[in-house]
Image: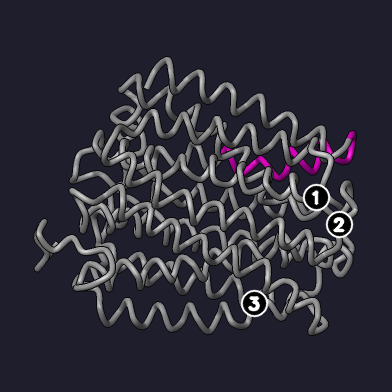
Amino acid sequence: MDGVTRHDERLVTGYTGRILLTVSIGYLVIQFGRNILSPLLPDIMEGLSISSVEAGLALSVIGFTYAFSQFPGGRLSDQLSRKTIIVLATLVATAGYFVLIIVQSYPPFLLAAAVIGLGAGLYWISLRALMADLFIARRGQAFGLQDALGFTGPLLAAGGAVVAVALGSWRLGFPPVVVALLLIGFLTHRWLREPYVVETVEFNFVATGRRVFADVRIRWLVIAYTAVVFSMQAVLGFLPVYLQVERGYSTALSSLGFALLFIGAMVSMPLSGSLGDRIDYTPVAIGGVTVAIVGLMLTLFAPGTLLVMVGVFGFAAGSFAFPPVIQAYLMTLFPDGSMGGDYGAFKTVYAGVGSLGPTYVGIVAAGFSYTVAFAGLGLLLVGAIVLLARYV
């Protein structure tokens, strides 16, 4: 990175700190927009007259297009520039959120979901590659801080949903997102010391797949990662609905539970990244998933509201401790010249399959209950621990 040395790896000051904060706040805004959909889902389902299956499909579409964009986004950021793709992604996501302000029926709602997922995916993979460029010795800490800032967006989304409903329409949650993303795009354009590059890009899908998954550790790790992400997406998508429908909580109380998911993420992500840098990445990841299982069981079977909320926090703290350490570990396995594309290929697999989590919950809940659907996630997390302990 032009003008940056290893001695400049500052997290909150200087050039690296300013860029870290700016692009992470951009992802915060994108995450706000994505995650305000979950606490607003009961109102959206009523307003658009859609079923739980249709709602789950829309959330999965966001996750699927998010996943689909990872490899091409990473490859583009490698061969063009991180700045080119980050600014483009900001504009794409902005367009998707603007559609949500005016949507009146399910098909354009589904289209908006696809566009939002595409913009979010292009943004995230380029952001992650940019952070890997800027930070080497403090990479785990930078990833953890960036994740924690990003998850402030979903935390704010819980309160934003309450405000939007109180003001009379779920659509009111999205105008602030559009305005903020345009501002972030402008600041990135001004501050990031990279040129815009537009030229033909060779993707080499097959060669990349062979290179990335030739390592047996990566093959098993992608399965474990998929199990964790599938569970995270399932809970993120339907926790507020579960708390309202099967626990009988109010909109405000279920929004509090949703907010606790991201409070747990904000606490655990910087901590896990720092521990991973100092100790080792794999034991921290295994410990996090273990805590997530305990938290999920409390959420489902604890007798009182306080213990349920403790469980939600525990699930979040444990599951969100996983990404910073495993991603930092992965970056040590990928060559610098193809890091964005290689990690994008890895993430396309786990995020693509993981995006089906909300669809799984919607289907199982329609046939049985949300409790049954969530309980099944515990088995996936146990499997993830076994794979991490045995193969990574």
Is disc 1 surrounded by few (<14), some (14 to 19) or many (20+) residues within 10 Å? some
Bounds of the magenta span?
353-368
Q: Amino acid at mark 1?
A: Thr
Position in image of residue 382 (x %, y %): 59, 23
**Residue at 25% across, 33% down:** 333
Is disc 3 surrounded by few (<14), some (14 to 19) or many (20+) residues within 10 Å? many
Q: CA distance from mark 1 to mark 3?
A: 31 Å
Snapshot quadrant of residue 159 = bottom right
Question: In terms of sequence position, does the residue under pointer 2 or pointer 3 come before the other?
Answer: 3
Mark 3 = which residue? 174
Q: Nearer the viewer, residue 157 or 256?
A: 256
In the image, taking residue 380 as reference, residue 321 lies left or right, namely left
Q: Amino acid at mark 3?
A: Phe
Question: In terms of sequence position, does the residue under pointer 1 or pointer 3 come before the other?
Answer: 3
Mark 1 = which residue? 305
Q: Nearer the viewer, residue 195 or 327?
A: 327
Mark 2 = which residue? 249
Position in image of residue 209 (x %, y %): 36, 32
Main structural element of the magenta stretch: helix, strand or loop?
helix
Is 4 inside the magenta-drawn segment?
no
Question: In terms of sequence position, does the residue under pointer 2 or pointer 1 come before the other?
Answer: 2
- Do labels 2 and 1 touch, CB within 8 Å? yes
